[in-house]
Image: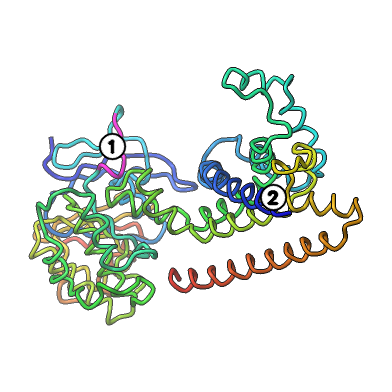
Amino acid sequence: MSAGLTVAVAGRMGALGLDLQMDIPLQGVSLITGPSGAGKTTLLRCIAGLTRLKGRIAVAGEVWQDGARFTPPHRRQVGYVFQDAQLFAHLSVEDNLAYGARRAGPVQGLSTAEVVGLLNLSPLLRRGTAQLSGGERQRVAIGRALLSQPRLLVMDEPTASLDPEARADVAALIGRLATELATPVVVVSHDPGRLAPLAQRRIRMAGGRIVASSAPSADAVDRLDGIDPETRDGLARAALAAGLPPLPPPG
Amino acid sequence: MTDAIWTTLRLAGLTTLLLLIAATPLALWLARGRGWGRDLVAAITALPLVLPPTVLGFYLLLLMAPDSPVMAVLRPFGVPSLAFTFSGLVVGSMIYSLPFAVQPIRNAFEALGDGPWDAAATLRASPLDALLSVALPLARRGFLSAGVLVFAHTVGEFGVVLMIGGAVPGRTDVVSTHIFQLVETSDTADAGRLAAGLVAFSFLALSAVMLLDRRLGRVAG
């Protein structure tokens, strides 16, 4: 029985056949990369219980899904940060933050005050969600997810819709989450850029499968550290497209 | 004349309230449900739009008459007949206005998409909780449209209420049927006053809705 996050599901989503096998520790930032249509979002949705494929999903030995059981999403302790934030338009920022906190029961991890401080949300609290910039929306979405007391935070392209400045802010924030909080983060990005250096491990997907998984200390990611992340990612993608191993072999 | 106005307002108010409650689960299922029955049910729901009110009223009258199978079920509960009663009018109006309630609410739920439901679920809200705390508030413009359309449509109803209500003064005689009777007895002065009142009321109701809808739109974005 694994103490980490175990996913072993398979099935079809429209034209895409998926076969997802993954077993990662519940610690730090895990970065899932791959071209669009690789099944990255579906993987996150399966973890959260929003999409149901056949198979098994367990977190720290607690089975959320297997042949007989399927824990519905509202009973899984997953914080989900959607690509488009999905803030509730009829609630203020403050009430959006309170939505998950109120339903999660007594505070075990972070209090609202701590999250507001960490994400610098106090100037936004009284605003409506329509008056937020893209970066602000993502910060509120991250705060809202954190306050639902998750055992695991998953983020779907948290920086994709942001301008470069906001992208740097949100990336720095995710780095702080990893170092300052005990909550493990699984983040999906087709273009990791600034997120890449934050990750303790990288999982590469293509065509509905996990094609490579790596921890940084053991392989070539470190050897490529001198190269900027965009180039490194481009190299890896080119290698993948050419049918080579996903990361260049050492030495 | 005041009797007819009072009956009309009571009928329209009660029909609107009950129909909004009854139409919500139906609209939700049509917007988000699965299964092959949806198109069929959607078509049946829309039937009152195309049927002549007299046809609908005729069938409803048959069902509400004391010797109908429906009334045989209701008789043990102390309801011998719904024909020519106010309760019968409410039931008839609900069926007649059903598409005007279901369609705007269904559209509002469809416009929401899955996103808010998914977000609520990952924030520990059960499906019922998500409906009450997220989907209904976000769909409120649909409910507002539905409420006003049903109210106005019920006030303007004639064929169905005449068929199943019979325009009994003080019970089932509403403004529209009262105008008809006044004209029949050549009392055009009173008929004119009532008719003008109905026009003014409808205009005010629709204006109020458009204003309210604009304000809601500004707040919710």
Which quadrant of the rendered structure holds the C terminus of chain A? bottom left
Crowding around mark 2 (Cα neighbors within 10 Å: few <14, some 14 to 19, many 20+) is: some
Span shown in magenta: A69-75
| Horizontal and vertical percent position of residue B13 | 59, 50
Chain letter for mark 2, please.
B
* Image mark for residue B3: 2
Q: Which quadrant of the view contains residue A186?
A: bottom left
The residue under label 1 is: A71
- Distance, label 1 to label 2, CA atoms, is 58 Å
Name the colour scheme: rainbow
Which residue sits at x=43%, y=53%? Answer: B135
Residue A234 visible here: no
Q: Are marks 1 and 2 on the same chain?
A: no
Q: Is residue B90 magenta?
A: no
Residue B67 visible here: yes
Q: Which quadrant of the view contains residue B93?
A: top right
Amino acid bearing label 1: Thr
Amino acid bearing label 2: Asp
Q: Nearer the viewer, residue B98 or B10?
A: B10
Which residue sits at x=18%, y=55%? Answer: A214
* Image mark for residue B1: none
